[in-house]
Structure formats: C-alpha cells, structure tokens
Amino acid sequence: MKRVIIDTDPGIDDAAAIFLALGSPELQVDALTTVFGNTAVEQCTVNALRILEAAGRADIPVYQGSGRPFNFGAPEFAEYIHGSDGLGDAGLPAPSVEVRDENAVIKIVQSVMDATGEITFVALGRLTNLALAISVEPRVASSLAEVVVMGGAVTVPGNVSMVSSANLWGDPEAADVVYRSGASVVQVGLDVCNKVEISAEQLSRVWAARTPVSELMEKATPFIQKAYAERGREMGPGAVKYNDVPAMSYAIDPTLFETRHLYVRIAIGNELTQGQTLADLDGQTGEQPNTLVALDVDGARLSEMWAERVSAL
C-alpha cells in the first residue's frame, strides 16, 4: 500500500477524490490536511471531517492548515462552484468528530521526516501548506516519495483565467516554492481533467448504493453540475466533472496516464499570467525537467474505477 497525506480544500470534487482514495486498497491514507481554497479553511476542515465520517473513517486524523496565501495576501474562494459551505449548500449535518490540535504544516514536517521516502503528498488544493513545510524544513522536498499536484494547464486554457488553473492561481508563490524545491512533482492538471467525466449512468449506480457516501455525493453534486453548465463547461447529459479525481487516480494507478518529463515554472506577479504553468515543451531553456506532466488519460477506465469503488465504499 502507498502511504498518502491528502492536502485538501473540500470542495465537491475533493469529496469525490477522497472517497475514491478511501475505497482503493492501493492507498493507505495517513491523514487529511486542510487549506483554504474552495471556501475558508475552517469550513474546509468541517467538510473534511464530514467526508471521513460518511465513509466510516473517523479514525483518520484531520489537521487544519493555512487560511491565506504564502505571501499573506487575501484568500480567494470558489464558492460559486462549490456553494457557500463548499459541499453544494446541501444542508449536511455537522460532524461528530473533531479536528486534531496540531497545525497541518507542523504535522506534515513531522510525518514526512519520520518516514523518509515513504509518503506521497496528494495536493488537491493550493500548495500553501506544503510550501510552508518546505520553508520550515527544506529536506521535506527530497524526503517525500512524490508530490501529486492537482493543477496546471499546459496545452489547454485555464479555468480561472485564460492560462491558469484555480489551485495554482490561488497561491502562485506557494506553487513556485514547491516546483523549484527539488521534490518529485507530478502535475495532473486541466490537460487531463478536461477529458474525464462521470456519466449519468455511472452516477445513477453510485446513487443506487444508498450509503452515507453516495447520499453525500448525491446531495452535493447538483450544485457543481449547475455551476459548470452556467459557465459553458461541456459535459454529457447528466454527467459531472470532478477535477480532483484524476489526481487521486494517478496516485492509485499511473498507467491510466500518458506523461512527459518537462521543465515547468510558475508565473508570479502578473495579472494576466498569475499561476500559469510555463512548460518547456521544446527544450528551449536548456533546464533539466523538474515535473512529470500528465498530458493524456484513459478517461473511460478512470471514470469506471471511480464509480465502482465509490459505490462499494
């Protein structure tokens, strides 16, 4: 089993990805760490606890992390995609379990340094927590087995600006720290997320399971479906895109993806390009690759894996 820390800002698609992880025997989820993003970090933490409780996994600890970007600027949220509570304003009950006292950044440093080379860090949100951990203890970067980043757009447009994906746009300084840290970074961005959707038929199979997991997803999903439809995101009738699911799927089964080793930098400080993943596709910089970039995916196999595993959870 691959040991993972899931850094997350739940988020409807985060919930879908976390449930996939919990239903996958390939992964051992050591902890969830929360970060601002889809909504405020305090609400993201509540949602992480809700997700684990629905899956019957309240034994997995949750640690709250950063509530604002690496440069201490004002945080930007995505409530227009996920609802004011982050889970589709579905009126979900409060969790009965509590967040741990330790700060997420400190816990990341401790966990990684105590298990050098053993932990994969799956970043479903802003990279703030990991950037802070690397700043506190630079050896974290080389001590992680891998960092799977949900974000980036190399060959396709962005989803929050013309060129940038939301997670990297939301804290480009943190992303820059991580990409330049020497960590083994895998970028699973919009190049592949745009090619993966869960069909109406697959959703109906999950809803039919009538478990706490399926009921949470069934209540939350209409909000993101409506938000995407209003913004012209193309999907099949009744389908949905959970953009965090491909990143988790890479941690489970990298053979689902076609990848290239590329030199990637993160644009900072320019209104037009903030958070852009600048990939050296033609070797123009002469720099050594620092990122394994996912450029294609077996979307049909991936979506079926999600449906099967989440309906059985």
Image (cartoon, rainbow, N blue to C red):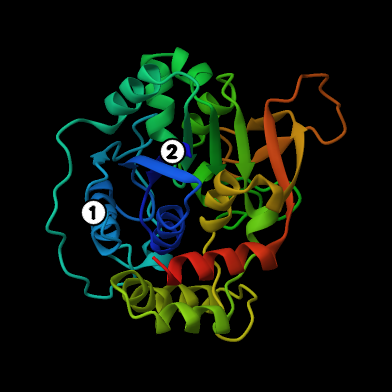
**Residue at the location (50% across, 79% down)?**
203
* Snapshot quadrant of residue 311: bottom left
Q: Earlier in the sequence, mark 2 or mark 1?
A: 2
Which one is closest to the eye, mark 2 or mark 1?
2
Label 1 amino acid?
Leu
| Percent of width and height locating residue 124 | 46, 47
213 relative position to 49: left or right: right
Q: Quadrant of the C terminus?
A: bottom left
Q: Which residue corresponds to mark 2?
A: 4
Disc 2 to disc 1, how far (Cα)?
A: 17 Å
Q: Which residue corresponds to mark 1?
A: 49
289 relative position to 282: left or right: left
| Percent of width and height locating residue 2 | 49, 38
**Residue at the location (75% across, 32% down)?**
262
Front residue of this view, candidates 80 and 237 = 237
Q: Is residue 195 visible?
A: no
Assess disc 2: are there few (<14), some (14-19) or many (≥20) residues with their C-alpha within 10 Å of its C-alpha: many
Label 2 amino acid?
Val
